Amino acid sequence: METIMSNLTAQLIQVLSPQIFGDHVIKLADRPYKLDDTDKIDELCSMVEFDLQAAKSALDSVINSVATHTMRALCDVRIHRNRLRPSFRLPNELIANIFELVEKTPENSTQMLPARAPMNVSQVSTLWREIALNDPNLWTSISVLNAPLHRAFLPRSKGAPLDITLVPLQGRRFGHPYHHTEAVHDKIMSMFPYSIGPFIRHLDRWRTLEIDGLQPGTFDYGGAFASPAPRLETLHVNVKWHENNHSAVESAISRGSSHLFGGQTPRLRDLTLGGLCIPLTSPIYHDLNKLSLANINFDHSSINDFIAILAACPLLKMLSLRGVEFPMFNGDGIPPFGLTIPIHMLRLESIDFCWMDGDSVRRILTAVRVPASAKLHLVASNDTDLRGLLPPTAGILDSFPFLANIRRLHVYTTAVGCEMFDYGHSLSRLHVRIIDFDRADATLVERVVSSIGRELPLPGLEALTLERTGGLPLGVAAFSRMLHGLRSITFLKLVDSTTLVEALILTPTSHMCPLLEMLHLHRSEITREDLLPLVTSRIGGDQSSGHFRSIKLTECKLVGGAGVVRELEGCGLSVEWDGCMVE
């Protein structure tokens, strides 16, 4: 570098010397003048100024030449250095694949537009820009941020399928919330569908359309979206919720008509509609893998129409219905339970029903047969119970064979309802919540709990936890009716349920939980007088089966202390006590 600078300095001096010391340069010291000769002095100064400007221009020209030469030299050095890097030796196709993977990462979608692929990678180098511009797949993801750049994205994407995702950005990076993107999203939604007019002209290229926050009544079924969508695979539309617009009501459209996408979506597999009602007779519901409907009132379709949809989707994996309403049944055209031809859904992984009419839920669950690996999630209000939700007991294990494999169950009772779910090493396969927010039904909890084991058969259940987290204590009679259908239990945990121990005492007329091995009482007010009859009836009593081996007492302050523990151990029982006593 020192050699280069020395050469450049020498060249610079060589060029400037004639300009500085040339004969044409006016030297004030060689020009005699008189003080009163002001005109000549002014002329002389003008000539000097002119010569200095000429010298400055020459100097600037030389400096610019040096700078240009330096920049070219540095550029050549960088190019040579980049060519020595391992990444430069990668094939362009591999680099393009890396760019595509980066563009699809969740982190990329949370970045600001200049720092988001493909915009950022196309500005790194000439090679990367060429690769990015020649890869159509990099320009197919349309979001709230880049939708206004359709003039750049559409030509560069060429004929590749488009993924249009118009949802508010939830990410936060570097402390900058996306307030401006929310405004852009709101503007797009307020002017929908005209705001995406340039993309509608390429509707035949759509692969994904996700819209969240759509204004009610702005989704044009038969206008902008009347053309076929032969590549569409995913359609998610969620209408903005309004206080006076709880759910979308099905319009009186002819059952034989279907305007949306011209009824031609042969590749559609993932459909989510929230607050947007499409008639159940539409072919858009056929051959789906995922179906999610929310806040829809099907006034002109029946539950039979929906069951027909399930039959038309034999490969369905996920089914979710939330706040979906069907017309009240009058008996016309509704086959009795058990007479419908079962629909075998061999790929179904999960069923999620929330806030629906109990009879609708029951008819759908009765109509399907799911694999043992499926999951069932139900949330209902106080106008129903397990009997009103689940299929008839005669065929429920055929419909949901995983019930026979449940080994552990946790039941919560609260002031507003009841909740139950299985637990273990894997994810929960059963989750049922029945809630009475108005607390209008005082018998709800007891009706639900007492029907476990009868309306909800669990023939393989081994461990049961019953926990009261609020509300009135569960009655012994309701608890006994539940245990009557759960005779395989070997472990029982009762939380804040003192009086229920009475149901576990073995008598000639009451023989609940004959296989019980361990009892865990937590946060119970049980006393010695309540506990000893239970232990003696199960160890050495006439009705004893010899299975009861241990008891665990935690936060049971009234049990009586170490003396009672020794007394229980004297009966041949293994006792675990945390030492909690009344202070």
Image: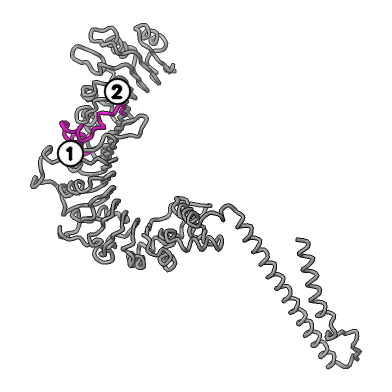
Residue 238 visible from this viewpoint: no
Tell me where the magenta segment starts and ends, as one range.
382-409
At 34% from the left edge and 65% from the top edge, which residue is drawn?
202
Q: Are marks 1 and 2 in contact (CB under 8 Å)?
A: no
Residue 72 found in image quarter: bottom right
Quadrant of the snapshot with the N terminus: bottom right
The first of marks 1 and 2 along the sequence is 1
* Residue found at the very far left of the displayed protein: 332
Which disc, if any, is residue 44? none
Q: Is residue 519 above or below residue 47?
A: above
Which disc, if any, is residue 462? 2
Residue 440 found in image quarter: top left
From the viewer's side, name the closer residue of 42 and 439: 42
**Three-letter amino acid code at the position of disc 1:** Thr
From the viewer's side, name the closer residue of 7 and 292: 7
Residue on which the image places disc 1? 366
What SS does tag 1 mark?
helix
The residue carrying pointer 1 sits among few (fewer than 14), some (14 to 19) or many (20 or more) residues within 10 Å by Cα, namely many
The residue carrying pointer 2 sits among few (fewer than 14), some (14 to 19) or many (20 or more) residues within 10 Å by Cα, namely some
At 65% from the left edge and 63% from the top edge, which residue is drawn?
76
Measure how far apart labels 1 and 2 are at the Cα level.
26 Å
x, y percentage for residue 571?
A: 34, 7
Q: Is residue 153 above or below residue 570?
A: below
x, y percentage for residue 143?
A: 41, 59
